[in-house]
């Protein structure tokens, strides 16, 4: 973006000229014709059009004079710093600096020309002074000669009185001398006039030289002032911090230099970037936030400078249609209002893809409902449900225990009419809610030996039906043993505890917290010694390995987070066996243990699987 004024010579016909420099406003473009400022022109893009073509032979100069009184963008406290505003200010500063440099260069050139002109004038004055001195010397010589001629004439006159012949000769000579003297006098007068003219010219030359010297001094002063202004402008530009834009966090230079500045335009993930110091607590990067960083070799780290919204309007939440991203806290009530179009206020909880949602909606206006539901203090246990105390207090409740037997029968029971009657009698005052005989075939299924009541079975042939029942055992009905007693293809009371598992309240479930009242134990699986030993964590929790080699305990297979156990490492009768570990093993303090190498010594490694690639382990050494 170099700058140089446009110059040309008018030809009396051309009105349009093309300029090669940039400008901020057309008002900044100026013109001079024959060194006289003119405003009789217009500017469009890079074309300057004069109202009248400059006369032939006259100089044309088109230059830029950027406004240096009013800054392009004036930032107020708390305002957004937009890149376009910063660029406008720097462009204005650059243009003013370029123009100051051009003025300084022009003034320097003019000063140099003035000095040259003054030196030439001094030389001319010295020559005139020398010529005047020579003329004075010539006039003095002529005057001396004239005096000598007068003396000679006087002598001649005296001699003429004495001797006529000599007098005549002397008279002639005197006449000649007088003539010569007159000529000399005229010459002397001419020389004196010339000397006076030379003296006047010399005085004028000195005056011109003094004026030129004064102009040169003024030009030097102006040039020095322009140079100072240019230097100050250059220093201001040099001291301005220019940030190099980078697209995102992954584009931050990996090998920066000291005092490198970058502007990360998409700061997503900046909170996890390292090395970085000074990150504000809780700050989370986003695509709409630009972050500025500075690299320093002191500590070899990037330092946080500041951040701003790419679109300043993003800093404000819209009254309608806005979306809040990230965690947001409210220190008072949040009211979700309803309206006549959408009905009662509702809270929508979307899925992670925002394609599905569950609504919690208030009762309609007609219910005149105003109450508060207070959740329980805990998360409850498996199978519990929420109940209310009628005043808005919610608590966890459990369903009643399942019926263990009906009319003395346990296991798989088919209700008959007699069972219904017995149950009705047992209900006492609750007879109205107990099963009645009239319910059979209406509200409950009547007993039918040929009924296909297992899922997917609808057979009329007994043999086929029995075969279908066998398929259900171990699928829809829990088998007691994979090897069912021969012939038991239809479940009867006698199969409970034999063919199928009888109900047992002490049965442990994998998805429910358990409290064991008897000892639980796992077997210890023996590993085979080798240069590399790879445990299968699906085989057991506890292992023992008698070392007959310098062994590497490799990364186990079938890792499941949460598994724990112990590995006993036993030196053989020779001893001096060493151990090393795969990359998944992570020992306390970050250092693997050095095994006890005494013959028959026992070390124990206790472990907990943290993830599919991480095992936390602690060594206890040198058991007997």
Image: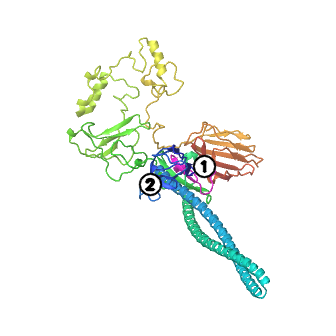
Pick the residue in front: 174 or 231: 174
Instruction: Tell me which residue sits at (70%, 38%) in the image.
Output: 528
**Quadrant assignment, res 211:** bottom right
436 relative position to 499: left or right = left
x then y, percent, for residue 137: 71, 77
State whether residue 400 appears in this view: no
- Magenta residue span: 255-275
User: Dot 1 lies on which element?
Assistant: loop
Instruction: Tell me which residue sits at (79%, 86%) in the image.
Output: 163
Q: CA distance from mark 1 to mark 2?
A: 31 Å
Pick the residue in front: 257 or 324: 257
Vertical relation: 502 (above or below) 546:
above
Q: Residue furthest top?
A: 461
Mark found first going from the N terminus, 1 or 2 = 2
Pick the residue in front: 313 or 398: 313
x then y, percent, for residue 30: 48, 52
Label 2, residues with CA under 10 Å away: few <14, some 14-19, many ≥20: some
State whether residue 509 appears in this view: yes
**Residue at label 1?**
253
**Residue at label 2?**
73
Pick the residue in front: 21 or 92: 21
Q: Is residue 257 magenta?
A: yes
Label drawn at residue 604: none
**Quadrant assignment, res 220:** bottom right
User: Dot 2 lies on which element?
Assistant: loop
Instruction: Tell me which residue sits at (36%, 49%) in the image.
Output: 377
**Quadrant assignment, res 418:** top left
597 relative position to 617: left or right = right
């Amino acid at each position: 973006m170099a700058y140089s004024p446009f110059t040309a010579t008018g030809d009396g016909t051309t009105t349009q000229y093309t300029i090669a420099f940039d400008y901020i406003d057309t008002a900044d473009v100026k013109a001079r014709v024959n060194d006289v400022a003119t405003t009789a022109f217009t500017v469009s893009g890079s074309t300057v059009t004069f109202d009248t073509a400059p006369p032939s032979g006259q100089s044309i100069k088109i230059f830029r004079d950027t406004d240096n009184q009013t800054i392009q963008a004036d930032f107020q406290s708390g305002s957004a710093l937009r890149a376009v505003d910063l660029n406008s200010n720097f462009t204005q500063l650059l243009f003013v600096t370029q123009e100051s440099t051009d003025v300084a260069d022009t003034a320097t050139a003019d000063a140099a020309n003035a000095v040259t002109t003054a030196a030439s004038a001094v030389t001319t004055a010295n020559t005139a002074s020398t010529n005047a001195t020579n003329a004075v010397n010539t006039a003095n010589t002529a005057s001396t000669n004239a005096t000598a001629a007068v003396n000679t004439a006087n002598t001649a006159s005296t001699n003429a009185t004495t001797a006529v012949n000599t007098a005549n000769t002397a008279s002639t000579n005197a006449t000649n001398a007088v003539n010569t003297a007159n000529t000399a006098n005229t010459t002397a007068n001419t020389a004196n006039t010339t000397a006076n003219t030379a003296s006047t010219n010399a005085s004028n030359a000195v005056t011109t030289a003094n004026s030129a010297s004064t102009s040169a001094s003024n030009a030097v002063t102006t040039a020095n002032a322009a140079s100072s202004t240019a230097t100050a402008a250059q220093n201001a530009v040099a001291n301005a911090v220019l940030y190099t834009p980078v697209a995102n966090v992954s584009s931050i230079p990996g090998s920066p230099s000291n005092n490198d500045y970058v502007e990360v335009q998409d700061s997503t993930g900046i909170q996890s970037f390292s090395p970085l110091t000074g990150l504000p607590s809780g700050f989370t990067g986003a695509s709409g936030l630009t972050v500025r960083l500075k690299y320093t070799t002191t500590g070899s780290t990037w330092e946080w400078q500041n951040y701003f919204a790419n679109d300043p309007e993003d800093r404000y939440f819209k009254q309608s249609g806005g979306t809040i991203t990230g965690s947001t806290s409210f220190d008072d009530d949040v009211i979700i209002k309803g309206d006549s179009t959408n009905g009662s206020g509702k809270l929508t909880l979307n899925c992670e893809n925002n394609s599905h949602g569950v609504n919690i909606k208030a009762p309609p206006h007609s219910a005149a409902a105003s109450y508060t539901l207070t959740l329980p203090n805990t998360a409850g246990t498996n199978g519990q449900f929420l109940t209310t105390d009628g005043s808005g207090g919610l608590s966890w409740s459990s369903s009643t225990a399942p019926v263990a037997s009906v009319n003395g029968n346990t296991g798989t029971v088919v209700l008959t009419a007699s069972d219904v009657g017995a149950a009705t009698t047992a209900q006492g005052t609750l007879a109205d809610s107990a099963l009645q005989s009239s319910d059979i075939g209406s509200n409950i299924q009547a007993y039918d030996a040929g009924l296909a009541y297992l899922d997917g079975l609808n057979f009329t042939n007994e043999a086929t039906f029995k075969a279908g029942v066998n398929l259900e055992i171990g699928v829809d009905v829990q088998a007691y043993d994979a090897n069912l007693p021969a012939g038991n293809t239809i479940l009867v009371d006698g199969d409970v505890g034999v063919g199928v598992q009888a109900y047992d309240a002490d049965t442990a479930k994998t998805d429910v917290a358990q409290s064991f009242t008897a000892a639980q134990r796992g077997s210890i699986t023996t590993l085979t010694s080798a240069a590399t030993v790879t445990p299968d964590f699906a085989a057991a929790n506890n292992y023992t390995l008698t070392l007959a080699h310098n062994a590497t305990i490799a990364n186990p297979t079938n890792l499941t987070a949460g598994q724990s156990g112990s590995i006993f490492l036993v030196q053989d009768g020779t001893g001096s066996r060493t151990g090393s570990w795969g990359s998944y093993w992570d020992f306390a303090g970050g250092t693997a243990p050095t095994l006890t190498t005494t013959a028959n010594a026992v070390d124990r490694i206790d472990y907990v699987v943290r993830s599919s690639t991480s095992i936390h382990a602690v060594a206890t050494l040198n058991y007997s």
